[in-house]
Image (cartoon, helix red, strand yellow):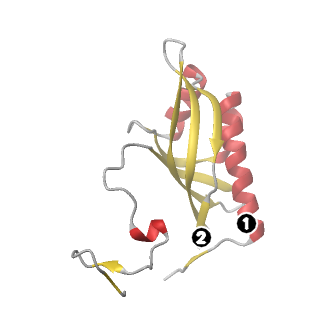
Amino acid sequence: MTEVDEPSAAVRAELIDVERRRCDALVAVDVDALAGLLDDELVHIHAPGVTHSKAQLLEHLATRRPYLNTVRGELAIRMVGDVAIMTGPLTNRLRNPDGSERTLSGVATQVLRRDAHGAWRFVSFQMTPTGEQVWGSLPSENGAHGGVDNGAGHGTEA
């Protein structure tokens, strides 16, 4: 079984660059540049759950021109062989059908694979918009002692 690893510094830089080029192509409505970054088997799931193929995403970009700005936060990157899984915050400033604008923030998960020529191509994209968090933070997210909550309000060692 292939291990899940951290990318080397060089691979991390390559992946960050590919993501920057993807964001730039969306804002510039550079359909050709974007087409070169996307795998032919792309599955792109927009924040409201609309799913597009590569051809549909390119049509969406060309006809609707929705992306006005895209800002990425710090990306966590995991490698499984020649597959990269990137997860991190994303904020898009978008054009609405009526010409007004909106800002949508969330977390995106992207899967890329290295093709036979060594180029990284996006295979999957899914954005989950930031919403109400009814449970609050876990103890481990607050820097607590790292124990496991046993349901009685007392931590136990894992």
Mark 2 falls on what kind of element?
Answer: strand
Whichever of callouts 2 and 1 sits on the residue coming sooner in the sequence is 1
Q: Is residue 129 left or right of residue 133?
A: right
Instruction: Rate crowding at label 1 as few (under 14), some (14 to 19) or many (20 or more) other CA atoms within 10 Å.
Output: some
Quadrant in which residue 69 is drawn: top right
At 72% from the left edge and 44% from the top edge, which residue is drawn? 21
Label placed on residue 116: none
Q: Is residue 99 visible?
A: yes
Label total for image: 2
Q: Are marks 2 and 1 in contact (CB under 8 Å)?
A: yes
Q: Farthest residue toward the front?
A: 153
Label placed on residue 11: 1
Q: Is residue 119 left or right of residue 60?
A: right
Q: Which residue is mark 2?
A: 79
Q: Is residue 135 left or right of residue 87?
A: left
> Mark 2: which amino acid?
Met
Say which of 106 and 19 sits in front: 106
Q: Examine the rendered structure and indicate whether residue 13 appears above or below residue 144.
A: above
Say which of 5 and 55 sits in front: 5
Distance Cα–Cα, label 2 vs label 1: 10 Å
> Mark 1: which amino acid?
Val
Q: Examine the rendered structure and indicate whether residue 39 appears above or below residue 93.
A: below
At 51% from the left edge and 39% from the top edge, which residue is drawn? 105
Residue 10 in percent (x, y) is at 78, 67
Residue 17 in percent (x, y) is at 74, 52
Which quadrant holds the C terminus? Answer: bottom left
